[in-house]
DNA sequence: CTTTAAACCTGGTCGC
DNA sequence: TGCGACCAGGTTTAAA
């Protein structure tokens, strides 16, 4: 479950090692991921120099001059550097660099993706419809409120829509709602202006905190340098059903299911809208 | 149009 | 010990 902070942590870890490296050879051991790796992927990537490692939402972008390699880690994807070619059962792609190291893509659940585009990556179909980056000024409460207006889906579900805002996943959606004091079941279009303001701020704060902790969310997340990335942060509500709210309000964290996903909230700190006079 | 559910996939856990 | 049921997650596609 790499969300924005984890992907950004991977980017920061890999950028110094990959920038100015030339990809000498590409080894594809398994082509079928979320989408099949294109048949001409190896040809288009081999011999190219990595000019920059960028991120958009949860997508990593290896800028290769005329081409850009687009990588998504899905929920179990890991990028690592190795002295050995890919050999692990779920190591699907290896790229031999000109420093004799391999960039290895491992993804047991194969929800990830790897492709290449010659166009500006922002115009690629995977990125074109993404909402604003949550840590930029483009994502602000007036934008947020306008996009939520009239929506009848729960705010938790809306938060996870990458077309609304890019990079927020299941964990940080719950954490942001908790920090903002908004019940996850509140219909998106019924958030007050102040709710939108607090929630916008909470999303930014929660993501920045996780980023500072080095990316926190994956049970099976390994940072680019091989160290576990999740040990520093503790979530206030996520995965804490039945445990006391860490605001020490005396209530226990409640788990509910929304759109097939688990959500967690504190019934005291995040009162349901029916109880606030706004429902 | 909006919203929801199913699909993809593997590995870990839980109950029997 | 084994086995089935279920859960985790991001995103797209299909269905309602």
Image (cartoon, coloured by chain):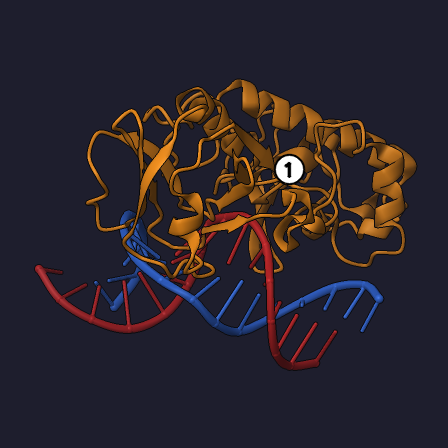
Chain colours: A orange, B blue, C red
Identity of the residue drawn at 62% across and 28% down: A207
Identity of the residue drawn at 86% across and 51% down: A189
Q: Compared to A103, does A42 lie above or below?
A: below
Q: Compared to A102, does A110 lie above or below?
A: below
Q: Compared to A6, does A43 lie above or below?
A: below
Q: How many marks?
A: 1
Q: Chain of mark 1?
A: A
Give the percent coordinates (x, y) of residue A279: 86, 51
Give the percent coordinates (x, y) of residue A47: 39, 38
Instruction: Answer with left or right where residue C2 lies relative to residue A79.
Output: left
Name the secondary structure under disc 1: loop
Quarter location, residue A103? top left
Name the foreground residue: A145 vs A261: A145
Instruction: Answer with left or right where residue A229 lies relative to residue A148.
Output: left
Q: Compared to A4, does A272 lie above or below?
A: below
Q: Which residue is mark 1?
A: A266
Identity of the residue drawn at 21% across and 45% down: A88
Name the foreground residue: A147 vs A177: A147
Residue A127 in view of the camera: yes
Name the foreground residue: A211 vs A120: A120
Give the percent coordinates (x, y) of residue A71: 49, 44
Give the percent coordinates (x, y) of residue A35: 47, 60
Residue A244 in view of the camera: no
- Category of crowding for the residue at label 1, using alpha-carbon neighbours closer than 10 angstroms: few (below 14), some (14–19), many (at least 20): many
């Amino acid at each position: 479950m790499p969300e924005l902070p984890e992907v950004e942590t991977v980017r920061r870890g890999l950028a110094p090692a990959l920038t100015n490296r030339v990809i000498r050879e590409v080894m594809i051991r398994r082509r079928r991921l979320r989408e099949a790796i294109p048949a001409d992927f190896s040809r288009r990537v081999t011999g190219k120099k990595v000019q920059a490692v960028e991120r958009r939402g949860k997508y990593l972008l290896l800028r290769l001059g005329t081409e850009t390699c687009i990588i998504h880690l899905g929920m179990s994807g890991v990028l690592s550097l190795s002295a050995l070619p890919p050999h692990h059962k779920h190591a699907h792609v290896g790229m031999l660099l000109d420093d004799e190291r391999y960039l290895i893509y491992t993804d047991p659940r194969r929800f990830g993706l790897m492709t290449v585009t010659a166009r500006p990556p922002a115009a690629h179909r995977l990125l074109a419809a993404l909402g604003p980056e949550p840590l930029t000024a483009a994502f602000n409460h007036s934008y947020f409120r306008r996009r939520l207006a009239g929506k009848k889906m729960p705010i938790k579900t809306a938060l996870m829509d990458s077309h609304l805002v890019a990079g927020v996943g299941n964990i940080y959606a719950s954490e942001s709602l908790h920090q903002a004091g908004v019940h996850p079941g509140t219909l998106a279009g019924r958030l007050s202006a102040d709710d939108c303001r607090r929630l916008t701020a909470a999303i930014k704060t929660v993501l920045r905190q996780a980023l500072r902790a080095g990316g926190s969310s994956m049970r099976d997340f390994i940072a680019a340098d091989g160290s576990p990335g999740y040990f520093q942060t503790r979530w206030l509500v996520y995965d804490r059903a039945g445990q006391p709210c860490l605001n020490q309000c005396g209530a226990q964290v409640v788990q509910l299911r929304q759109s097939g996903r688990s959500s967690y909230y504190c019934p005291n700190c995040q009162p349901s809208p029916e109880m606030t006079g706004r429902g």
